[in-house]
Image: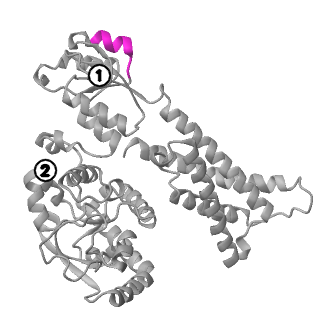
């Protein structure tokens, strides 16, 4: 997992502790206020409910994703909205189950303490992450297109990296200072003392100072190649730099029979749970589609599954019945073929719900690369290197690419999504699947990345 995932986990744990602690602190403060403060035997349970509601509302306000609150104003509004949502959610819970309700002054006091602590820790995190002297200090060994690409991608993504400069023969414009020639490698590393040396050469790969790199690795700082650095920072694999050896000799991409069996049980459980929870939504959707436009409720479409085998994907029909009379084509922004109901269910991803059946039939997994149509697969395999690798994983209802990249309708979009899909295939685990599922719920409710 990327460093941002680990930092978000720590942020989540901090919020849980603060939310629960705020309830007990507010209850303690109540003792010194006018009026009668009674002991509360259910305070632990009430603190748990309060914490859960608060964390869920924070999550849906993107307070565990720093990319959505890079400025203090954005952070403040997100926290206030999260607190408002939590107050509404708790009011509903207390109305349904009065015995778990907190006293008004305790609730408001706890909420004030929670929001204040949430703001302080995140404001501090922003200052730490985007400070000029915070982050991983990196020196790049390389002065060509690979180094330029690395500088551009990492800087534009706002990752916590400080580029101290680059080492190479050419004094090119890399938006970073040239530290010296490769012959001065030892001196430069000793003077700069970086956390990481990233090896990103272009045309002089065969002349790399291997002995010097080994010595630096063992005595000074970690040494990593540019594709691995890019992968660690961004959560995607640099398709342009893939070599067969990087797949053959890596520990990723493979799974044991036990892991496959566990994942299959995971898929069945979540598919059944999803069908039960969304059954009312699916019934309403089916009626709305029937009333909105002529044609069937469901739409069966051939997709390419694992190992290139075709299967019939089940979706709610969101387009006119004659949507593809001129042949297969990707959906586009404001696609005129989409019906009125279709526009809503595509926005909220409700059209994907019948795919639970595909999961139960073992055509798909709950999490994996999105299945494409044969027509597009044949086209993309010709222009995108290693595109066929994604066919060695069972396709999924949702995936790492779906939560990290918006809907794409071009070859370049397909290339970018492949970077995320290969990252998932290399690092797949049940934990990563759970992260993706929870992120998917948020993405669906906020209507992000749909067409």
Q: In front here: 424 or 149?
A: 149
Percent coordinates x, y for residue 111 in the rendering: 70, 56
Identify the mark at residue 231; answer none if there is no mark. none
Percent coordinates x, y for residue 291 in the rendering: 36, 90
Residues packed near mark 2 inside 10 Å, few (<14), some (14 to 19) or many (20 plus): some
* Quadrant occupied by the C terminus: bottom left
Q: In front here: 397 or 375?
A: 375
Percent coordinates x, y for residue 321 in the rendering: 22, 83
Single out the mark in the foreground, 2 or 1: 2
Q: What is the spatial separation of the Cα atoms under label 2 and label 1, in whole angstroms? A: 34 Å
Relative to 56, 138 lies left or right: left
Q: Count the numbered circles shown.
A: 2
Q: In front here: 15 or 159?
A: 159
Q: Secondary structure at mark 1?
A: helix
Tell me the residue at 28%/80% (across/down): 317
Queried whether the magenta region covers residue 288, the answer comes back as: no
What is the magenta range? 186-194
Percent coordinates x, y for residue 437 in the rendering: 39, 63
Q: Is residue 216 above or below residue 155?
A: above
Tell me the residue at 29%/41% (across/down): 231
Q: In front here: 334 or 168?
A: 334
Instruction: Place residue 271 in its image quadrant.
Output: bottom left
Q: Is residue 269 visible?
A: no
- Label 2 with label 1: CB-CB less than 8 Å: no
Identify the mark at residue 217; answer none if there is no mark. 1
Q: Which residue is mark 2?
A: 384
* Secondary structure mainly formed by the magenta segment: helix
Relative to 36, 247 lies left or right: left
Q: Is residue 132 visible?
A: yes
Tell me the residue at 9%/59% (across/down): 379
Q: Secondary structure at mark 2?
A: loop
Tell me the residue at 24%/36% (across/down): 227
């Amino acid at each position: 997992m990327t460093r941002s995932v680990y930092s978000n986990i720590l942020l989540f744990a901090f919020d849980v502790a603060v939310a629960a602690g705020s309830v007990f602190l507010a209850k303690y403060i109540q003792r010194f206020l006018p009026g009668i403060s009674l002991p509360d035997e259910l305070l632990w349970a009430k603190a748990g409910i309060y914490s859960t509601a608060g964390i869920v509302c924070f999550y849906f306000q993107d307070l565990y994703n720093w990319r959505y609150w890079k400025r203090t104003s954005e952070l403040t509004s997100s926290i206030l909205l999260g607190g408002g949502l939590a107050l509404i959610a708790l009011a509903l819970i207390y109305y349904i189950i009065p015995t778990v309700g907190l006293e008004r002054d305790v609730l408001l006091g706890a909420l004030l303490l929670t929001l204040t602590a949430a703001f302080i820790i995140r404001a501090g995190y922003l200052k730490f992450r985007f400070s000029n002297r915070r982050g991983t200090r990196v020196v790049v060994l390389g002065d060509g297109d690979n180094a330029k690409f690395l500088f551009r991608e990492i800087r534009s993504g706002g990752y916590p990296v400080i580029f101290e400069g680059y080492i190479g023969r050419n004094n090119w414009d890399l938006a970073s200072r040239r530290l010296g020639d490769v012959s001065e490698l030892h001196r430069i590393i000793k003077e700069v003392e970086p956390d990481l040396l990233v090896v990103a050469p272009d045309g002089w790969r065969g002349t790399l100072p291997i002995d010097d790199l080994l010595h630096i690795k063992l005595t000074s700082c970690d040494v990593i190649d540019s594709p691995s650095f890019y992968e660690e920072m961004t959560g995607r694999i640099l398709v342009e730099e893939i070599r067969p050896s990087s797949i053959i000799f890596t520990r990723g991409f493979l799974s044991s029979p036990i892991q496959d069996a566990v994942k299959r049980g995971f898929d069945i459980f979540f598919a059944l749970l999803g069908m039960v929870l969304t059954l009312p939504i699916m019934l309403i959707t089916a009626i709305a589609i029937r009333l909105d436009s002529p044609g069937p409720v469901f739409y069966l479409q051939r997709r390419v599954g694992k190992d290139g085998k075709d299967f019939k994907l089940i979706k709610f029909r969101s387009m006119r019945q004659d949507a593809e009379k001129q042949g297969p084509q990707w959906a586009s922004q404001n696609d005129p073929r989409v019906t009125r109901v279709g526009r809503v269910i595509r926005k909220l991803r409700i059209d994907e719900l019948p795919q639970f059946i595909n999961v139960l039939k073992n055509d798909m997994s709950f999490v994996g690369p999105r299945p494409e149509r044969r027509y597009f697969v044949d086209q993309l395999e010709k222009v995108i290197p290693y595109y066929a690798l994604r066919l060695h994983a069972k396709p999924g209802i949702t995936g790492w690419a779906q939560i990290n990249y918006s809907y794409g309708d071009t070859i370049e979009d397909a290339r970018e999504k492949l970077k995320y899909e290969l990252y998932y295939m290399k690092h797949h685990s049940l934990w990563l699947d759970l992260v993706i599922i929870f992120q998917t719920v948020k993405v669906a409710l906020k209507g992000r990345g749909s067409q």
